[in-house]
Image (spheres, rainbow, N blue to C red):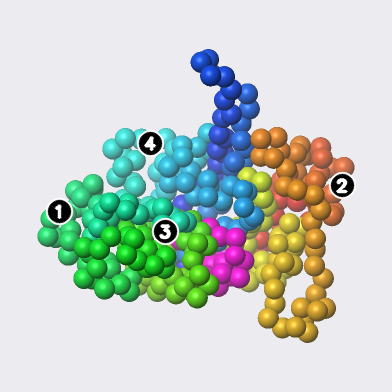
Amino acid sequence: MVSQEVLLSVDKLVKYFPIMRGVIIQRQVGAVHAVDGVSFDIYKGETLGLVGESGCGKSTTGRAILQLYRPTSGSVLFEGVDLVKIKGEKLRQMRRRMQMIFQDPYASLNPRMTVGQIISEPLIIHDISKGKEAQERAEDLLKLVGLNPAYTNRYPHEFSGGQRQRIGVARALALDPDLIVCDEPISALDVSIQAQVVNLLEDLQSQLGLTYLFIAHDLSMVRHISDRVAVMYLGKVVELTSRDELYAHPLHPYTQALLSAVPIPDPVIEAKRKRIILTGDVPSPVNPPSGCHFRTRCPLAAEICKEKEPEWREVQPVHWVACHMV
């Protein structure tokens, strides 16, 4: 059940990666503008979908929220505590309440550890349980995600991609977190397995009262799982509203183009539908365009788009857009 209580508040989050030159004496010659002033709230018990094409900064946003990448500037308030300003033991204690499910189930599990060791590792690191107690907790978590508890002594290479992602989910649940960042958890899986993993995430959310930031580029899957959806382009959030409102009335030209590319399983409607084809390539995040980042590919671009960055504003109740033309 989605409450009106804000769990996480991201305000003007910025993450730049420096570009260094030189062999002996290194100097910074530029920066990759991976995340460039992102703001949104996540409410307790909801799933916020974060979508956009590859390289737009979705995964970097998720990692910067969890402080896996320390942000360049901005704030990340988790129940009133600014994660950007804390470090050391205080941050370690907060980390128990936020976990991540990684994109690649083949790379995110240590091949030298058994499944039992992988799942119980967070319990041991945070001094919650050890030995037999931790092993029993690992068995319970395997059962929770739909795997045989007897598999604790097996190694990751003995499992399929879908089973490995379930192990990743079990590890994320070990510390009873409040927030889970799902970083494209289904993009590396077969289509038939994707639905199983998404259904598992939904079941766990209703059972345990979890809150998700669900990062993906599959718009149909985001529509299925999310309560609200944020659309990202070149390091900025350009539109944010409820799932139904976004798919019924997209306002930003980039969102309209994205949704026009989603196939509809009705040949009659599909034949009549107008596709929006964007011209040109995505600009480099090293040197993004002035004003609106999307103006170089936008069919509605005007002179103001070049000169002035669009304001992030609420154009309708709970429908936020950054566009001069809306």
Kind of residue indicated by mark 1? Lys
The residues bearing labels 4 and 2 have C-alpha atoms spaced at a distance of 43 Å
Mark 4 or mark 1: whose residue is earlier in sequence: 4
Q: Is the Cβ of the residue at disc 3 closer than 8 Å to that at disc 2?
A: no
Mark 4 or mark 2: whose residue is earlier in sequence: 4
Mark 3 or mark 4: whose residue is earlier in sequence: 4
Residue 199: x %, y % from top left: 45, 74
Asked if one can make out residue 93 in the rendered structure from this viewpoint, the answer is yes
Kind of residue indicated by mark 4? Ile
Q: Which residue is mark 3?
A: 105
Q: Which residue is mark 2?
A: 302
The residues bearing labels 1 and 2 have C-alpha atoms spaced at a distance of 62 Å
Q: Can you tell which of label 3 and label 1 is closer to the viewer?
A: 3
Q: Which residue is mark 1?
A: 130
- Which image quarter: residue 115? bottom left
Q: Which residue is mark 4?
A: 86
